[in-house]
Amino acid sequence: MLNLDTKVENMVGVGPKTALKLQKLGIEKVSDLLYHFPARYDDLSKVTRIADVKVGQTCCIEGKIVDIKNQRSPKKRIFITHALLSDQAGSIKAIWFNRPFLTRVLKRGENIILAGKLEYGPAGIYLNNPIYEKEAGILPVYPETEGLNSKYLRKLIKSAIHLASQINDFLPNEVKKHQNLIDIDKAIRQIHFPTNQSVILRAKSRLAFDELFLLQIKMLKMRKDWQENKAPKMIFDKKTIQSLVKKLPFRLTDAQRKAAWEILLDLQKDIPMNRLLEGDVGSGKTIVAAIAMLVVAKNKYQSLLLVPTEILAIQHFGSLIKVFSDFNIKVGLLTQGKNEINGHKVQRKELLEKIQEGRVDVVVGTHALLQEKVSFNKLGLAIVDEQHRFGVEQRATLRRKSFAPHLLSMSATPIPRSLSLAMYGDLDLSILDEMPKGRQKVKTFFIPPNKRESAYRFVTKQIKNRRQVFVICPLIEESDKLGVKAATKEYQKLKKEIFPEYSVGLLHGKMKTKEKETAMHNFKSGKYAILVSTAVVEVGVDIPNATVMIIEGADRFGLAQLHQFRGRVGRGKHQSYCFLFSDSSSEKTKKRLLFLVKFQDGFKLAEQDLEIRGPGELYGIKQHGFWDFKMASLKDVITIQKARKEAKNIMKSGLESYPAILSKIKEFEAGRKLE
Ligand code: ADP
Ligand code: MG
């Protein structure tokens, strides 16, 4: 007897070869088959009278086969099948190439439906290579693999569709009622064998809702599990914080104050914090993090600041030492190439020992921190900067790293709020939606090839005024993963041909730590007028005197990423500029880049990116591992919000009272590796 767990190879009509092909589509069991959804539908439900069809149009007709025969084309050695069909009002020819078996399937005298394009050739008017069906209806067209066509899949699914009634309809009745959703068996039946267009939509809504709902449940559960741990309570006194804040060369923005306050309140609890601090490039996240680390150190606990690149680690290390200079806080730096404490070189072994003994209060580091056996004495707070750069896996490692530190993630990727709820539903959110005072707009220009010269002349003037310039290069070859070749080539060109009288520096991921550092140092100190770089500088780097950001091949980057690059300039008091160089003549590309010219606001740009390129391309989502929904879309903000609301209600009344959901979650997790 067939059931949902039956392996497809045990179904009638599925041989070992077919089973392998099905496997390629991810179909192993009958239930997978039922969840293999059509990519689209061919509507053969509306037939036109043969007398009314027009040449050049795609049409669908119904008629009796008056004649059908195969012919071998003498020259080309191909089979041509000719058929003649007629209905009450007319008749029409149909032609297929290389499908001799058709004469066995379609018999004279039979009634069939044909759909295809009506063309005109030497032999008159004919339907070219039409699809055929014996009954009118809406036909699902499946994502296919070679040798498994939709016709076959339809037949196979039909033989199992009665099992739809055995699917676990995990969605509680009250949710279905609230959200006006149909039962799962009905949805599965109708997605495969719809009777009209509107039932397809109903089926899709139910199936999409399921995925988003399960994701939300999963995240809320993760959050709950996380919060069942105990974290150390951090007491803070306002005086200490004020003494740090007073010393800063600027006033905190209201948004920074609010975010810091939210974080401090979290730290006071023995429930581990799990918060995302989101703020556009330059909104000042680091200092907010520093305030939290100060409080943690005062409570005699350690903090860890994890960053994606070495350059950034070194920079943060430097600024933290400065910020903490009055506080007797020991800051350590741990990267692949560098080990330091408060600016003094130490042996790696010594550093690791001191961390373990609790004699370093704040540790700044890169991935090295995660990979190695770094053990902390009393880790109270872990901060992940530019968290979208870290994979889900890595975030998970961090949680396992110690019993349960407070966790703060920081991201400069402004994503629309609803999307961030979908992606980071397990996190609380603090948003820096206000830029520090006096930040100027970075004037942005789209530069086609014929304006390149004049852009360079402009840049020369900036350099003469002692300003500095970034040049970002995209990857030009697949094999050039780190962009070494691209950047090196551009560097040579600028140095020799375009700006021979100025000093040009180079920065890419393949350089040794020492070399990278020297390059950054030389740029920071003003020795280089121009720094040619790969996307390495994209994150974090702070050079207030740089006023020009040139992006080569700008069309190759997403808006969010371009916005990050642009955030590298406009950090000082001088007017800054961003030039988007592009050789692309596509209007679409130009239109996309012009958004950047028009908008300075990262949130707006992220929304545009989402609109144009879809969520898969949005920064960080790829690492997240759930862009491969079968039906749901991360663009579907409304359903995301509804699913979240319902999931919250369920969690409130206790997930244990919903065994059907729990078992579905298990299934869902087995199917797609979330966290
Ligand atoms: P991001 O949010 O991109 O990480 P940073 O924390 O690196 O931003 O801050 C960018 C720059 O702005 C730094 O030089 C920092 O010292 C400065 N800064 C931070 N907060 C303020 C503020 N309230 N007013 C002026 N400058 C600030
Ligand atoms: Mg930053």
Image: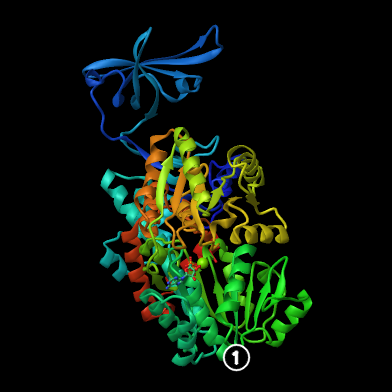
Quarter residue 660 falls in? bottom left
Residue drawn at x 45%, y 20% is: 103
Residue drawn at x 64%, y 58% is: 522
Instruction: Report x, y in % for residue 633.
Output: 39, 54
- Residue 395 in sight from this viewpoint: yes
The 10 Å Cα crowd at callout 1, few under 14, some 14 to 19, many 20 or more, is some
In terms of depth relative to the viewer, which is nearer, 163 or 225?
A: 225
Q: Give, as a three-letter code, the residue at label 1.
A: Lys
In terms of depth relative to the viewer, which is nearer, 127 or 433?
A: 433
Instruction: Report x, y in % for residue 14.
Output: 56, 42
In the image: residue 335, left or right of residue 33: right
Instruction: Report x, y in % for residue 177.
Output: 26, 66
The kind of secondary structure element at disc 1 is loop
Quarter residue 211 falls in? bottom left
Can you say whether 434 is above or below 481 in the image? below
In the image: residue 221, left or right of residue 645: right
- Location of the C terminus by quadrant is bottom right
Can you say whether 311 is above or below 32 in the image? below
Instruction: Report x, y in % for residue 322.
Output: 58, 78
In the image, the residue with mark 1 has its CB under 8 Å from the nearest atom of ligand 1 = no
* Residue highlighted by disc 1: 300
In the image: residue 405, left or right of residue 201: right
In terms of depth relative to the viewer, which is nearer, 531 or 581?
A: 531
- Residue 140 in sight from this viewpoint: no
Quarter residue 429 falls in? bottom left
